[in-house]
């Protein structure tokens, strides 16, 4: 096996394109999973089965089926019903949705960990329910769950190559395309491997900094 | 510790105003599973009175406070505050009646994500619609009264238990309740911090016309501030009277036993 630096430099323009797409998937996917997971977690607390049962069923289903199957389904089946989005949009939504079924459980644990005395104090002060959530419960719950949410971001990063399967040219997609065209596999795959490590590491550093800030 | 010259709420009027019944529980029953904590209890408190509930744990004292704060719902009976029904009542009415009641908890229950100032101003602004400036001014006055002016910008975690409890008292008073419920407010405190909290409460009892319902094991404090002491046992009031009488010459054997155990 020979290492060819010129292959690396040939690959770099493609790498930057792929990196940008990967980061886009990661950032948007994370935001969707954070927001949607919170929505699920809150809906599961609505005191009627007409809400909790369907939400519970849908999220269980999404959590327990492979992301790859969901990607294929959204990308190839939805258009048959006349719903068409770009591969990237579909991929970002799918990964965000998939991970929202994990983050919802993180939020749930965080919400349940807020002591009951906080609810009681809010009642004693006559705070409206909405205000109790936004000013008292969620700020405390979210602070508790930041580390767990961060772990899912890193986990999501490692799932981004799955989007290659629906033609999204993220890092692995670019590497594979380059390899097939140039018959040079080692260099592009090594480059993106390193890129994954570097991104995970930077993300975990950012996460730790955030955690430190949240613990006043 | 500030004195009542700075008490930032309505002073005790020369002639006791608003006398008459403020709180009324009628035939209130509360069960937890098979265990009946309160059994058809009748109980009333006149406006401006300071009433202390004593008795062994599990005798239903705290349950009464929690029913009044609507943290629990009775299984039977009615609860009336200032002539308006608190239970049974529609949610909207509960919210209105509940404004008259404030509570201080054993575990303080300050909001750890807010500063001392925000803890106190949050409800006056969002519930009473007070302007931020007005609420902050009032918070400062209350903090001066409880002797914590220097800690206004801190978070609860930076305060001692006694300081947190004094903030909690200020927070409850910021809502200008007619009734203040005190649920074993010194039980979670280190012994050396108890006096500071009790001093604040004595100050409030002396200088305001707020009605106080107090569950406590601090018998000296109960003797100092109470107009009336109620001895509870197994969900019933077995003896009631002025503190001098209950503490010096209790009539009931059960009261005697209890007092000899705690005094």
Image: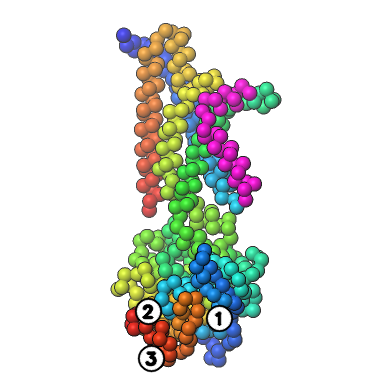
Which segment did they paint magenta?
Answer: A48-77
Q: CA distance from mark 1 to mark 3?
A: 23 Å
- Report which quarter residue A76 is drawn in: top right
Which residue is disc 3 drawn over? B248
Which residue is disc 1 drawn over? B43
Q: Is residue B75 above or below residue A112?
A: below
Using residue A29 as the reference point, say whether residue A154 is left or right of it. Answer: left
The chain carrying label 1 is B
Q: Residue at x 34, y 83 (%)?
A: B260
Using residue B140 as the reference point, say whether residue B128 is left or right of it. Answer: right
Kindly tell me whether residue B189 is visible in this rendering.
Answer: yes
Q: CA distance from mark 1 to mark 2?
A: 22 Å
Q: Residue at x 56, y 27 (%)?
A: A70
Q: Nearer the viewer, mark 1 or mark 2?
A: 1
Q: Considering the image in quadrants, where does the C terminus of chain B appear?
A: bottom left
x and y, in percent, of residue B246 in the image: 42, 88
Precedes in sequence: disc 1 or disc 2: 1
Which residue is disc 2 drawn over? B218
Q: Residue furthest front?
A: B34
């Amino acid at each position: 096996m020979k290492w060819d630096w010129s292959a690396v430099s040939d690959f770099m323009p493609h790498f930057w394109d792929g990196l940008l797409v990967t980061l886009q998937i990661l950032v948007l996917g994370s935001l969707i999973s954070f927001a949607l997971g919170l929505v699920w977690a809150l809906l599961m607390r609505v005191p009627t089965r007409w809400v909790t049962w369907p939400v519970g069923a849908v999220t269980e289903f999404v959590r327990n089926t492979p992301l790859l199957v969901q990607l294929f389904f959204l990308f190839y089946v939805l258009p048959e019903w006349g719903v068409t989005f770009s591969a990237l949009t579909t991929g970002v939504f799918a990964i965000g949705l998939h991970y929202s079924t994990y983050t919802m459980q993180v939020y749930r644990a965080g919400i349940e960990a807020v002591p009951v005395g906080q609810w009681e104090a809010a009642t004693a002060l006559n705070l409206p329910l909405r205000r109790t959530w936004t000013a008292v419960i969620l700020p405390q719950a979210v602070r508790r769950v930041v580390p767990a949410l961060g772990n899912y971001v890193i986990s999501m990063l490692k799932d981004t190559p799955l989007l290659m399967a629906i033609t999204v040219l993220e890092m692995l997609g670019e590497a594979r395309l380059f390899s097939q065209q140039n018959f040079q596999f080692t260099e592009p795959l090594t480059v993106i491997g390193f890129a994954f490590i570097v991104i995970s590491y930077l993300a975990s550093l950012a996460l730790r900094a955030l955690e430190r800030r949240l613990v006043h | 510790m500030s004195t009542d010259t700075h008490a930032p709420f309505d002073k005790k009027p020369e002639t006791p105003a608003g006398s008459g019944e403020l709180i009324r529980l009628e035939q209130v029953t509360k069960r937890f599973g098979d265990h009946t904590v309160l059994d058809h209890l009748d109980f009333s408190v006149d406006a401006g009175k300071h009433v202390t509930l004593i008795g062994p744990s599990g005798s239903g004292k705290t349950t009464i406070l929690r029913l009044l704060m609507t943290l629990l719902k009775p299984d039977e009976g009615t609860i009336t505050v200032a002539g308006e029904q608190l239970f049974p009542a529609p949610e909207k009415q509960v919210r209105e009646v509940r404004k008259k009641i404030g509570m201080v908890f054993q575990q303080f229950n300050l909001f750890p994500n807010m500063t001392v100032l925000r803890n106190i101003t949050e409800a006056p602004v969002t519930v009473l619609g007070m302007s931020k400036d007005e609420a902050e001014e009032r918070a400062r006055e209350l903090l001066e009264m409880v002797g914590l002016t220097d800690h206004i910008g801190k978070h609860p975690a930076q305060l001692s238990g006694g300081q947190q409890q004094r903030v909690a008292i200020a927070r409850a008073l910021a809502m200008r309740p007619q009734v203040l419920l005190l649920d074993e407010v010194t039980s979670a405190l280190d012994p050396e911090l108890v006096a500071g909290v009790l001093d604040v409460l004595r100050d409030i009892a002396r200088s305001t016309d707020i009605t106080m319902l107090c569950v406590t094991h601090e018998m000296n404090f109960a003797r100092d501030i109470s107009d009336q002491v109620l001895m509870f046992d197994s969900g019933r009031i077995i003896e009631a009277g002025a503190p001098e009488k209950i503490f010096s010459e209790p009539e009931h054997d059960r009261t005697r036993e209890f007092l000899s155990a705690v005094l």
